[in-house]
Image (spheres, rainbow, N blue to C red):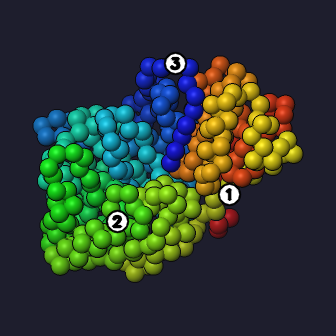
Amino acid sequence: MTDFSIRKECLSHAWQRGIATGVVLAVLLMSADPSSAQEMSIDSKLNEQIVLVPARSGALNVELETTIFKPPGSGPFPVVIMNHGKARGNPRLQKRDRFIFLSREFVRRGYAVVIPMRTGFANSTGDYSDYGCDMSRNGRSQANDLQSTLDYVRSQEWSDKNQVIIAGQSYGGLAAMAFGMRNFPGVKGLLNFAGGLRAHGGSCQWQSALVQAFADYGAESTVPSLWFYGENDSYFNHDLASKMFSAYVAGGGIAQLVAYGPFKNDAHKLIGSRDGVKIWWPETERFLQKIGMPTVPVFALVDNPALPKSDYATIDNIDAIPYIKDSGRDAYRTFLSKSSPKAFAVSANGGWSWGEDGDDPAARALSNCQESSRAPCKLYAIDDYVVWTGDAQVPAVPALSSTKSLSQ
């Protein structure tokens, strides 16, 4: 996903929490960091909650900031534990991942989706551990947090302990495949979305180290796995993916590789895109059926109506945009070149922001715009049409969806 906005000052990073009692603490989080608006309000319609899962990091007790989406009812539900990647820079500055499009597909089929932020990432406590070019150890170390998350999930009455999928994207995919070595009871399959880890700088031959890591994992895993790697992945191209896959299978691992073509400007972002579902879900559905996991939709996700197109201006009429100065109009030109989903927001004192792809770009555009503006921000355009009406009464972006049982 991409977000851009104009900013008037650097705001301090702060978190507000409400904490309930218990070993695992339920919290509501709100970001005050202007560098990103990925933190969204809690989606009660998908029964979203955030808990702090107890884990161990060496000799220390830590807590993992973990997002949970659940269908209506008390379960027990089959479970997907989905794992995040690693952005460059300080892991503590990474925002809570929600994988909203993946979560929606599984929740509507009756699954609970659990997304832990691993040790040292986002609001999880402890320090991130990095073992340099030892990619096998990096993945195995991250898998410890997956184990802690699974232990927590298995303690919950809403979980079906015998129907668990471990999934991950990028570094999270590497961790998921490393977890497969444990052959844990009830884990029926692994989903690897562009799994791996790339070293930056130094003399590390990270590509060959990754191939060796997957050879190590395949030698000890008996869990079936499904892999997705795109042709224009900026981290792991088809050639490297093929080598990792061959090493894994040669070691004895059970895997199917889906080497698909180019996806937008970077296939590494597939799982965070609304449009990526049509690529990964059909293959995932066949994989789930093969390993005896549910695939039939049991809940309808009802999207609220999209904001209507207005007659204010055509989408490419840059001069019609109110309030913003030349820098904002230049940004809007860039916005026009981007693929959907996307959104552009403005405010009466000249603030602006746009979001592309990822988790709810309209909400992110509004939130990022508001961080730099004292006046209320409103959406000007969504995808390829203008929603602005000229009276600053354009409503905020509606909630993503509601959930309804198909049996009702």
Please give the residue where the numbered disc 1 appears in the rendered image: 302
Residue 220 placement: quadrant? bottom left
Q: Position of residue 360 (x, y in %)?
A: 58, 47
- In the picture, measured across the screen, residue 73 lies left or right of residue 240, that is right
Q: Is residue 56 above or below residue 189?
A: above
Badge 1 element: strand
- Mark 3 or 1 closer to N-term? 3
- In the picture, the disc for residue 237 is 2
Q: Are marks 3 and 1 in contact (CB under 8 Å)?
A: no
Please state which amino acid type lies under the numbered disc 2.
Asn
> Can you give x and y, in whole percent of width and height, for residue 198 in the image?
26, 53
**Observer-nearest residue: 239 or 43?**
239
* Cα distance between the residues tagged 3 and 2: 39 Å
Which mark is drawn over residue 9?
Answer: 3
Query: In x, y percent, where is residue 58?
Result: 13, 40
Visible residue check, residue 262:
yes
Q: Is residue 19 left or right of residue 316?
A: left
Q: Amino acid at mark 3?
A: Glu
Q: Quadrant of residue 43?
A: top right
Q: In the figure, residue 93 lies in which quadrant? A: top left
Q: Earlier in the sequence, mark 3 or mark 2?
A: 3
Q: Is residue 350 left or right of residue 268?
A: right
